[in-house]
Image (cartoon, rainbow, N blue to C red):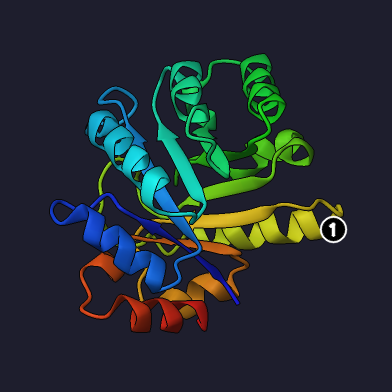
Amino acid sequence: MVEISTSILSIKENAIQKFYDLEVARTDYFHIDVMDGKFVKNDTSVIMKEYTNTIKQISNIPIDVHLMVKDVRKYVDEYLAYMPDRITFHYEALESIEEVKNIIQYIKENNVKVGISIKPDTKVEEIYDFLPYVHMVLVMTVEPGKGGQKLIPETLEKVRILRQYVTNNNIELDIEADGGIKLENIREVVSSGVDIAVVGSGITNTKNYTQTIKKLKNG
């Protein structure tokens, strides 16, 4: 059964009630999309900190932080204060292999799981060397930066390649996919080898969160 990480990016009003409803609906994680207006066009840095602070006060659901930012270390430090379950950064945001290794080590030293994310145009083979040291790989199935996009089918082939590689090399990690995932395509997403599906408007735009999440989890 796939786990569901609900992106709260599209929540604009009645946030506290919706967070409560998502908890009751048994989302596995709250997915926090942190954008800085530099690595991607949109800037959600203020509202996501506000939402994360609220969630920490009212819920025990694990927090799944996705940093779409250039200054990775700065935002890692900001979100470590919330004791999230995991922090995922973009491979493309750092300039050297050494920087990537240092961020992975830094997050782990602070007792938080670490994820590495790749954009649709980045080949999965580029991050193979880092896989033994991370807890999760986030494969973007749309261009990062905004919600409500349509899933790019070719990105699921990257998930299949990644799943085969980690299986063949006995590497233990979760594969997460993010972007354009909804009831209509969840079966295809899961069959590609995904452990955690990030779903935003595919949940928050529906009337019954409980029913939607249950259907998503069952693939």
Query: Which element is circle 1 on?
Result: helix
At 84% from the left and 58% from the top, the residue drawn is: 168
Q: Quadrant of residue 50?
A: top left
Image quarter hosting the N terminus: bottom right
**Is residue 139 visible in this depiction of the protein?**
yes
- Counting from the top left corner in percent of width and height, residue 198 is at 43, 59
**Is residue 158 visible in this depiction of the protein?**
no
Q: Quadrant of residue 164?
A: bottom right
The residue at the far left in this view is: 13
Relative placement, left or right, of 170 versus 97 is: right
Q: Amino acid at mark 1?
A: Asn
Relative placement, left or right, of 104 versus 58 is: right
Relative placement, left or right, of 146 versus 113 is: left
- Counting from the top left corner in percent of width and height, residue 93 is at 47, 24
- Of residues 123 and 3, the one drawn nearer to the viewer in this rendering: 3
Relative placement, left or right, of 182 versus 115 is: left
Is residue 47 depicted above or below 62 in this figure?
Answer: above
Is residue 24 depicted above or below 108 in this figure?
Answer: below
Q: Quadrant of residue 213?
A: bottom left
- Of residues 62 and 182, the one drawn nearer to the viewer in this rendering: 62
At 22% from the left and 75% from the top, the residue drawn is: 206
At 26% from the left and 80% from the top, the residue drawn is: 208
- Counting from the top left corner in percent of width and height, residue 134 is at 70, 39
Is residue 66 depicted above or below 10 in this figure?
Answer: above
At 34% from the left and 26% from the top, the residue drawn is: 39
Number of other residues with Cα within 10 Å of mark 1, as a class: few under 14, some 14 to 19, many 20 or more: few
- Counting from the top left corner in percent of width and height, residue 83 is at 54, 36
Residue carrying label 1: 168
Figure label count: 1
